[in-house]
Image: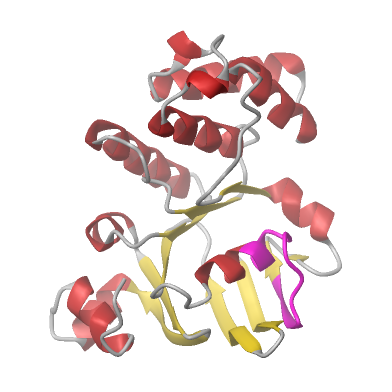
Amino acid sequence: MISIRNLTRNFESLKAVDDLTVTIPSGCIVALLGANGAGKTTTLNMLTTLLSPSDGTAEVEGFDIKTQSAEVRRNIGYVPEHGALYEGLTADEYLELAGRIRGMSGPAIVERSTELMEFFEVADSSQQRLATFSKGMRRKILVTAALLHRPRVLFLDEPMDGLDVRSQKKLGELLQEQATQGCTVVYSSHILQQVEELCEHVVLIHQGKLRFAGPMTDLQASHEGVGLRDIFLELTEDEQL
């Protein structure tokens, strides 16, 4: 579970996240939605301890992001929108590095990384340097690295970017499996069709403020069955994605 209390982040005169309070339940896929500049990535960066709040705090799996950041990081996986890879490493080398950082043993890293790379159909390229990988293949390696240690909470920022249709379907199935196993998945995306298909809950922010938090079915019912795209436009005052 993620409990966010009065979370705020200022950048000089800009209040990127403004007094955000919301609870995200365990074992489900939660959409984090908002227009460009709404504060989604800033929120993710605070929840993953990459950025300190200006005020307020949050607990991830019971650990405070300000006072227990190391414990938070041990329990999460994060796939940022523009995740960087060490291009001089092979996929195997990069994943071993990621696993060692997480405190995993060599055999455990090999077993888990092989399982995930076979699932994503990139195992045949495990000895190739990451500089040779396509955008979609790099995305698969980033997701694999985030899932190596079986995190209790998984944060994803535009995870489908660069993936072909088959790979998008496989990743969606994997995320649903993670949720059924008790993992909390926070899924930020502008692709609302995928959000509707995958996500059970919605957290929608606009100009740093919370506009809606709750089950997807409640959001749709409160708008008399209107599609998510039209609901989004209404709640964000017709701003463009």
Q: Please say if 117 is above or below 223.
A: above
Q: Is residue 30 left or right of residue 152?
A: left
Q: Nearer the viewer, residue 93 or 170?
A: 93
Q: Is residue 236 left or right of residue 143?
A: left
Q: Please say if 42 is above or below 160.
A: below
Q: Please say if 174 is above or below 81.
A: above
The residue positioned farthest toward the left in the image shown? 225
Q: Image quarter for residue 12?
A: bottom right
Q: Is residue 201 left or right of residue 149?
A: left
Q: Image quarter for residue 200?
A: bottom left
**Residue located at (54% from left, 12% from top):** 128
Q: Which stretch did the figure color magenta? A: 45-58
Quadrant of the rendering where the N terminus is positioned = bottom right
Residue 102 locus on image (x, y percent): 75, 35
**Residue located at (53% from left, 13% from top):** 126
The residue positioned farthest toward the right in the image shown? 67
